[in-house]
Image (cartoon, helix red, strand yellow):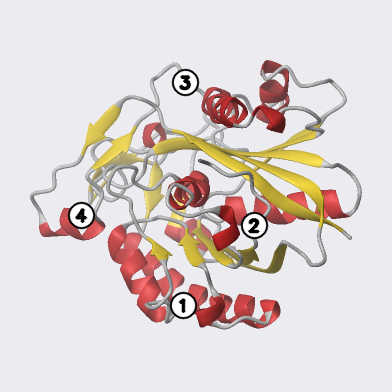
Amino acid sequence: MTYAAIRAVAGYLPPHIEKNDMSTRAAKALGIEERHVASPDQAASDLAFEAAQNLFEKFPQAREGVDFVLLCTQQPDYPLPSTACLVADRLGLPKQVGAMDYNLGCSGYVYGLAVAKGLIEAGLCKKLLLLTSSLYVREGSPEDGATRPVFADGASATLIEAVESDRPLLEAFVFGTDGALGPKAIIQEVGGSRYPHRTTEIKRIEDEHGSRTNADIFMDGQEVMLFTLREVPPMVDEVLQKANLTREDLSYAVFHQPNKFMLDYVQRKCKLQQVPFFNDVAKTGNTVAASIPLGLCRVLEEKEPAELLHVLMAGFGVGLSWAGCVADLSKMWSQK
């Protein structure tokens, strides 16, 4: 049988680094020492292109035969055309490739894996390049203490290909959405068709976290924390049930990386203390949709693909949305 399999993953972090003040107890709990920040002239396509180039340089065999480009971003180069089309052209891919953007944040990588699986296993493409590109830093206020120390810029590239296998290699997908709570918890109000820049008055807002405008990203950290602890544990249970796995069967858990404190809490709440669990935001911060694949890159520095038969992935945040799945990474090309 032919199934979709992750073959390779790579990331890109802009070279400019912004350090956080780690002198407070709150900062130490977040665990984010520094964050990579895109330069003013870098757009989503630039970060995605660099991630894809890193992938192709490490795995030259990845470039040949790519027939679809899927790009997750909430900061596209332009309202139109799709940024995926620009990246496909810049990478020198044939004009016969499919290319499209999709707008999701922290759960975007898992959603992208699901779309890739659907396209490949339906026979609509054979070799898909899944890109994420997040530039959240410039969308927040420098004076907003709730967002500035947390968000970072970064991108990822994942090659997903049709392979022969006796069982699915991406499976047990679970999705969820709370569109009623979403705008109250995380939102960038101005800039879309509801409140266009041209006709919307920009207002300054002062609160306990500092100063921002209605054109900046707003995040209610407490509400996001409560949402995560409410929705992620049952999602993990459902993923494991659908995959017919126990926690003891898991090779690794790689979740979205919001901050150290939240992940410590999520690990306990999901009863994953005995599972290898990636939790390291110290040098990257919250890179939104790029955080899971960047985490995978780190895991693959110490583990061979053959050791990663059951990797639990979970993304949760903007939307509000959440998604989880299990991936067998044994078909990946060795990173070493």
Residue under label 2, please give it: 330
Of labels 4 and 2, the one closer to you: 2
Q: Amino acid at mark 2?
A: Ser
Say if 106 sits above or below 12 in the image: below
149 lies left or right of 170: left
Residue 140 visible somewhere in the drawing = yes
Residue depicted at x 32% and y 50% = 281
At which x and y percent is residue 303? 48, 55
Q: Earlier in the sequence, mark 4 or mark 2?
A: 4
Residue 212 rendering spot, x and y as whole percentages: 30, 40
Q: Secondary structure at mark 4?
A: loop
In this rendering, which labeled residue sits more in front, label 2 or label 1?
Answer: 2
Residue 208 — which label?
Answer: 4
Residue on which disc 3 sits:
42
* Mark nearer the N terminus (1 vs 3): 3
Which mark sits nearer the N-terminus, 2 or 1?
A: 1
The Cα–Cα distance between marks 4 and 3, rounded to whole angstroms, is 31 Å
Q: CA distance from mark 3 to mark 2?
A: 35 Å
The three-letter code of the residue at mark 1 reads Arg
Marks 4 and 2, how far apart at CA: 48 Å
**Residue 115: horizontal and vertical position, in percent?**
75, 52
Query: Residue 230 — which label?
Result: 1
Res 188 visible: no
Front label number (4 vs 3): 3
Up the image or down, 231 lies above or below 97; here it is below
Q: Residues within 10 Å of mark 4 (few under 14, many from 20)?
A: few
Pick the quarter of the image with the N terminus. Answer: bottom right
Residue depth check, mark 3 versus mark 2: number of the one nearer the observer: 2
Q: In this rendering, would 142 be left or right of 98? A: left
| Spatial CA span between label 2 and label 1 | 32 Å
| Image quadrant in which you'd find residue 30 | bottom left
